[in-house]
Amino acid sequence: MIHSFRHDIYLPSTFELLTKGGDERIELDPIAMTNKYGCRPIPDCGLAAFGSATASTISEAGFDAAEEVRTRLLEALRNREPAEIYMAEISTLRSEFADLCRLTNLPGLEMIVSSSGTDAHMLAARLVDESAKIKTLAIMVQSTETGSGIAGALKGAESDLGKSVDVESIDIRAKDCSLRSTAVVADELEAMVSLAVARYDRILITLTDVSKTGILAPCPIRAQALKRRWPDIIEILVDASQFRLTPSTLQSYLTANCLVVITGSKFINGPAFSAMLLIPEAAASRLMTQSLNPAVGIASLQPEWPRHWNGVRSLPNSSNFGLLLRWKAALADLRAFRNISEEDIEKVVRAFHDAIVSALHYTQEFELLEQSALQCRPFAEGAAWDQVQTIFPFLLFHNDPRGKRTPVSTETTQEIYYQMRKDISPAAGRAHNPISSMRCELGQPVSCGELQGIRVSALRLSLSARLIVKAVEEGDRGIASLIEQGLLVLEKAAFLAK
């Protein structure tokens, strides 16, 4: 058999591909060469990277993995079509992910690859809504704790077959930044659902595990009780976009018949815009036979779906090599993380947690935002590292001219967030401090209410898989070094707050 080779093959560089196939959030600023999250599509070894609650700068291992995939794609494109190659690569990606997350023992598990967590929410809502004869309600926690685009993604456009999903939200924080109790939030969910079952024939309850400030809400056990009460009406979607979960916790959600959204771009440290919607067998059997809403084709391609799902052939049969490279970069970091024991992970997580919480409690420029326990998961047994907080949200304070301790405003906090990334030693002048030259990556400020009549937002210092792996590899010295670096990041934030 004679192959006809194509000589006009072109692929953008790895640097360029990592910024393609998403939306404007990963487009690069032409001057700073960073995306909306302040991240570059190349490694930055000089950055103290504690911003994984928002997004991460790609690791060296991740970039090398993406580079390797691009080289393989260039060779394959000489005699195969892009969509055919993409189909095979995405199939391999699913298998690798299932193996790394120990999901191969879950028969019938379906995985839909998606560009972003927002798009994955949209796909879940569209699938559930197509199974509704009349109307669907989606219930979520307040958007400041999830993402600005989640409510819109769940709702969908009015033009989509002439209907959209209704969306209601439940506050998990009060206006004074305090945390509402787990029981109160769960009671509000139950009351909302009890009223809604008379008006809606499908209800999608979206849980966050965890939110931007590390909150697990509403309580999954209470949500599961509602699903058992109305099994033909309620579907549960777990927003695990942060992916701060052990394999056993992820399995427990899927075994409990929950849909799960995960991303490779938060805790796992892959570049922004790599997500997946996981659908367990029982839910898949209900949803795969429904026709696909035309809106799905705006954010999805054929190869990203299981081929046997109804309506998949109506989707564009094309490729998104940028998404593929971002996921491969994320899997490189996930593989390194899975190669260390959960006992070692827990040792690092607990030591770091204790040191950072202590520093936030006893430094006058900080106030740790209230957080809840992370033990309200289905079938969770025994202690595990994902029951310990790895996101540390804190408010900034300074002394006003009269010596009164005053919260830093949302606007000033935003400016401090940008300054944290820079070497500000030239601008510090006589106020120069050695840590002013340190470049730090924190999670974006989260609006969380008012204090003393001032609108405030919380910065977030976050642990990530990459930081934990490095600490474990270096033993006790690595843990001490990780803690020292985290404390230096907080020191810079306090310096800027003053």
Image (tube, rainbow, N blue to C red):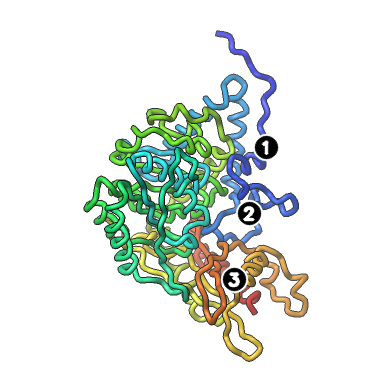
**Which one is earlier in the sequence, the residue at label 3 or at label 2?**
2
Q: Quadrant of residue 282?
A: top left
As measured in the structure, the alpha-carbon distance from the residue carrying label 1 to the one carrying label 2 is 20 Å
61 to the left or right of 202: right
- The image position of residue 467, as x and y in percent, is 52, 58
Which residue has dot 2 on it?
36
Mark with earlier residue (1, 2): 1
Secondary structure of the residue carrying tag 3 is: helix
The residue lying furthest to the left in this view is 229
Between residue 485 and residue 39, name the one nearer to us. Answer: 39
Question: Which residue bears the numbered disc 1?
Answer: 13
Dot in front, 1 or 2: 2
Mark 1, other Cα within 10 Å: few <14 / some 14–19 / many ≥20: few
Given residues 353 and 325, the one toward you in this image is 325
Q: Looking at the image, do the residues carrying marks 3 and 1 touch, with CB atoms under 8 Å apart?
A: no
- The dot on residue 410 is 3
Q: Is residue 345 left or right of residue 443?
A: left
* Crowd around label 3: few <14 · some 14–19 · many ≥20 (10 Å): many
Specify the amino acid type for callout 1.
Answer: Ser
Question: From the viewer's perspective, is 341 left or right of 402?
Answer: left
Answer yes or no: do the residues labelled 1 and 2 have beta carbons within 8 Å?
A: no
- Looking at the rendered structure, the kind of residue marked 3 is Thr
| Real-space CA distance between mark 3 and mark 1, rounded to the nearest whole angstrom | 38 Å
Residue at the location (34% across, 43% down)? 134
